[in-house]
């Protein structure tokens, strides 16, 4: 299940970047996350491991990720290395300069378990995910423009 959303923010990419890379700032806008912490000595760049707990569909997912892309003031991507309730989870966050500030995009690709049942569950989960993405993007806009 792929979900993507974008929002225009009246702030330069440099102001948004900390909200993409600092755990305390990520938790401020990404409200479905209950916990976010780097789990190794590496705290930035490709290969940095982290753990998060995310509430989705009323359930708490416990997930381990690894950063797969890191371009300062432009892009962060990460992929699940282990976790529960989903079999695949990738996200990419990008920020690009515009005339009035920046455009931030969040794209996620979630693989649900249970083969065909998972595909059917995904049809129902997509609407909720799209709604959640709009809410968290609005949170980021509010915080970054403050």
Image (spheres, rainbow, N blue to C red):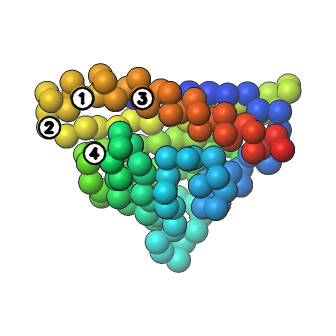
**Residue shown at 51% from the left, 66% from the top:** 37
Q: CA distance from mark 4 to mark 3?
A: 16 Å
Q: CA distance from mark 1 to mark 4?
A: 12 Å
What x and y, as percent, mark residue 7? 67, 28
Vertical placement of residue 106 versus 146, above or below = above
Q: Within 10 angstroms of label 4, few (less than 14), some, or many (20 or more) residues?
A: some
**Residue shown at 67% from the left, 56% from the top:** 25
- Residue 84 located left or right of residue 141: left
Q: Are marks 2 and 1 in contact (CB under 8 Å)?
A: yes
Res 47 seen here: no
**Residue that badge 3 annotates:** 128
Q: Nearer the viewer, mark 4 or mark 3?
A: 3
Q: Are marks 4 and 2 in contact (CB under 8 Å)?
A: no
**Residue shown at 50% from the left, 33% from the top:** 132
- Is tag 4's residue or tag 3's residue first in the polypeptide sequence? 4
- Is tag 3's residue or tag 1's residue first in the polypeptide sequence? 1
Q: Are marks 3 and 1 in contact (CB under 8 Å)?
A: no
- Is tag 2's residue or tag 1's residue first in the polypeptide sequence? 2
Q: CA distance from mark 2 to mark 3?
A: 19 Å
Which is more toward the observer, 24 or 42? 24
Res 122 seen here: yes
**Residue shown at 57% from the left, 46% from the top:** 30
What x and y, as percent, mark residue 58? 35, 43
**Residue that badge 4 annotates:** 86
């Amino acid at each position: 299940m792929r979900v993507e959303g974008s929002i225009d923010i009246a702030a330069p990419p440099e102001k948004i970047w900390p909200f993409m890379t600092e755990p305390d700032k990520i938790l401020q806008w990404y409200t479905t996350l209950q916990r976010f912490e780097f789990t190794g000595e590496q705290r930035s760049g490709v290969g940095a491991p982290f753990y998060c707990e995310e509430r989705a569909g009323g359930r708490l997912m416990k997930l381990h990720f690894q950063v797969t892309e890191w371009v300062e003031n432009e892009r962060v991507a990460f992929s699940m290395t282990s976790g529960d309730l989903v079999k695949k989870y990738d996200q990419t966050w990008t920020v690009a300069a515009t005339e009035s500030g920046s455009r931030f995009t969040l794209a996620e690709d979630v693989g649900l378990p249970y083969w065909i049942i998972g595909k059917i569950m995904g049809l129902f989960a997509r609407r909720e995910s799209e709604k959640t993405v709009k809410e968290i993007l609005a949170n980021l806009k509010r915080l970054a423009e403050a």
